Amino acid sequence: MDRAQSLQTLNMKKQVVEITLGGRTISLETGYMAKQANGSVMIRSGETMVLSTVCDGDPRPGLDFFPLTVDYREKHYAAGRIPGNFFRREARPGDHETLISRLTDRPLRPLFAPGYLRDTSCQSVVMSFDQENEPDVMSMVGVSAALTISSIPFNGPIGAVRIGQVDGKFVINPYASERKLSTLDLVVAGTEQAITMVECGAQEVSETILVEALVLAHQQIKLICAGINELRARVGKAKMAVTAPPANPWHDKILAGFRNDISAALLTANKHQRASNVKAVRDAIVAKLSDGIADAAEKEKTAAAVKAGFGDAKDVVFRDLILQGKRVDGRDTKTVRPIVIDLDVLPRAHGSALFTRGETQGLLTCTLGTSEDEAMVDSLKPKHNEAFLLHYNFPGFSVGEVEKRGSPGRREVGHGALARRALAQVLPPATEFPYTIRVVGDILESNGSSSMATVCGGSLAMMAAGVPLKAPVAGIAMGLVMEGSRYAVLTDILGDEDHYGDMDFKVCGTTKGVTALQMDIKIDGISPQLMGEALEQARQGRMHILGKMAEAIQVHRPQLSQYAPQIIQVQIDPELIGKIIGKGGETIRRIQEETGCKLNVDDDGIITIASPDGSAIEKAKGWINDLTTLPEPGKIYNGKVTSVKEFGAFVEFMPQTEGLVHVSEWDWHRINDMASVAKAGDSVQVKLIEVDVRTGKFRLSRKALLPEPVRAPGDAAPAEGQGDRPPRREGEGHGDRPRREGGYGDRPRRDGDRPRREGGYGDRPRH
């Protein structure tokens, strides 16, 4: 079979479905690439292409959890680039890739059939990126389509869409360039029936606008799901049969006989005491129901089954209590836990805050740095630096567990990114506050909502450090328990309420509106109307928290910490940047060494000077002013002798600028040997008496600053040139020959220039 026939055969198997969203087309292609995967789809928008594949493994006996792995990776060749690391190949995933992996995973995981416990791998690889069509949402749609056409029992499909808002109008799947102008960055995933996941960053957008955007997003999701279903109708494989796990035979017995005992144990306010009480009730139930079984093996098997049944029964009791309006810590559904705020708990940190809400506690610190501390981001987009960093740490001791600490996990990266997104919306522009800002959230105790404690504490730490935020930001985590038509929306959820509930809905914002939002659903989804109710309840809780924060600190402090670098910016003519940098960077290094300041020079002529010492900043500023200020005739300068000749001394009277003090201008009396009165390195005060516009030479005088000696009556004034020296002829400079083009003073002095040649200006004997 020749190539043409082979291509024809392959093309017969290739299927393409096109979906139009907001006037832009997305295509789903399968049957041509990666055909040995259980399901594979190449999704394309513009010139961005993402290959999504899914594979499953053989069943593993005894497995009691679903081993799902979702990975998103970017190939640098997709943007025509070579990786910037030492090995010049793609290495471990960056934070950006980890976040998109989580974004893809979260709406998919709840939709696999119960009882399906095979190893499952979902991978998305960006193979082409046109810098405009974003691949993150495409990855979500691509994996959903690949799962839908595979034999894996996935109860999808899901669709995903990004909604922006530019000039007050919603934009569906905005280009990267449009996102820069957007006040809203909303990613929504869902099924044809309901919304299942939300991720959002916003510039203080109101809850009403968010609900409108969610309704629009779900309309687009329905179109995407219809396109995926069309692809499944063409090439979809039969789904593998899955046997649902059998009902635990002890579940109903435990509920019937021990519901009150379980309720009493659960209704314990303290987290660890509650866990201890629940364990005691469980052990008592296990002992009672397995009592009387003589065979040891059978007794152990029964005990294990009772424990499993107890876990399911506890879940039911917990949810019933919430639907009855009873929360395990005694609160109603809308009450926020008690809040305690301590500022300046770390004396050497630039800003610190200890934020405690119930049994969740975060220590937040703010550190200010210079542009040298910015983080370089090397992804498919052009390299750029981030001046705002937020790192979230969740050590095992925060929940009383033993843990081996390694690199940050996906959860830590994700929670940190959410907090960063919430706070980034209120940062001052770099032109007003030219600092690199690093916020670190160390969770010291955790019982739910630790990421929201990071948002609240991060806002407080930055204000304590003197960062002029537009407004303080607070965050709150909402929950949901739904059984049929009955439901309860919970404010400020505990860890158990997150675990046993149906929704984890985190909302961050100011008094004006929302800055970040994240929602994950464990059930089939919720309606925009129910989400609107949750948003309003979250707003009320957020206002309460902002009020507590205002009691601790209302606005940013006017002064920075004494340990923080002071930064000023100086604007110069961009054409003078070379004078600041110097040959090979010598001048800027010299300024930094002599002043102890850090300097950064932008291409637009903005020079940033940073130092904890204000006097050092003023010294560096003086250097810059001298380098960029033109010499003024008649002005007095403090200079330094750079070299001595028989006809005079060369003096650097401004940085990198020198002129000649002729022997006749050194003093009022005759000088026979310049070396006897001056040497290199001497400090000397001089006056600029002439600037030769044609040659750029500078004539300096020391004599002009000295008092003229009083002459005895009858003494004649010495002739120009001091006594026996003839006066200068027209066109001649100091000394005995005319000035030459390229002589002294016509350009700034640079160390490393060639030494003056013997026989140069003024060094030959006079005729």
Image (tube, rainbow, N blue to C red):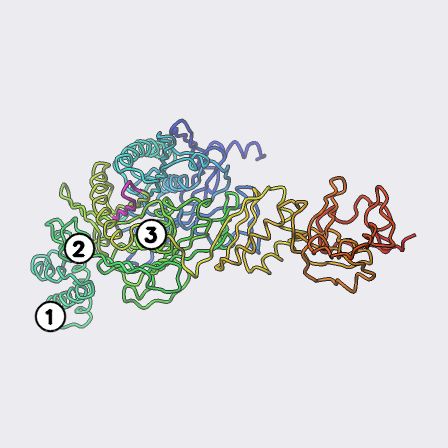
Q: Which residue is mark 1?
A: 291
Q: Nearer the viewer, residue 273 or 596?
A: 596
Q: Is residue 757 magenta?
A: no
| Residue 496 spot, x, y in % from top left | 21, 56
Mark 2 vs mark 1, foreground winner is: 2
Q: Give the mark nearest the N terminus, 1 or 3.
A: 1
Q: Give the mark nearest the N terminus, 2 or 3.
A: 2
Is 114 on the left-hand or right-hand side of 135? left
Q: Are marks 1 and 3 in contact (CB under 8 Å)?
A: no
Q: Are marks 2 and 1 in contact (CB under 8 Å)?
A: no
Looking at the image, the residue that sits furthest to the front is 713
Q: Amino acid at mark 2?
A: Asp
User: Which residues are drawn in magenta?
Assistant: 504-514
Q: How many marks?
A: 3
- Residue 315's disc is 2
**What SS does tag 2 mark?**
helix
Query: At 23% from the left edge and 43% from the top edge, which residue is drawn?
Result: 539
Looking at the image, the residue that sits furthest to the right is 767
Q: Give the mark nearest the N terminus, 2 or 1.
A: 1
- Residue 459's disc is 3
Q: Amino acid at mark 1?
A: Asp
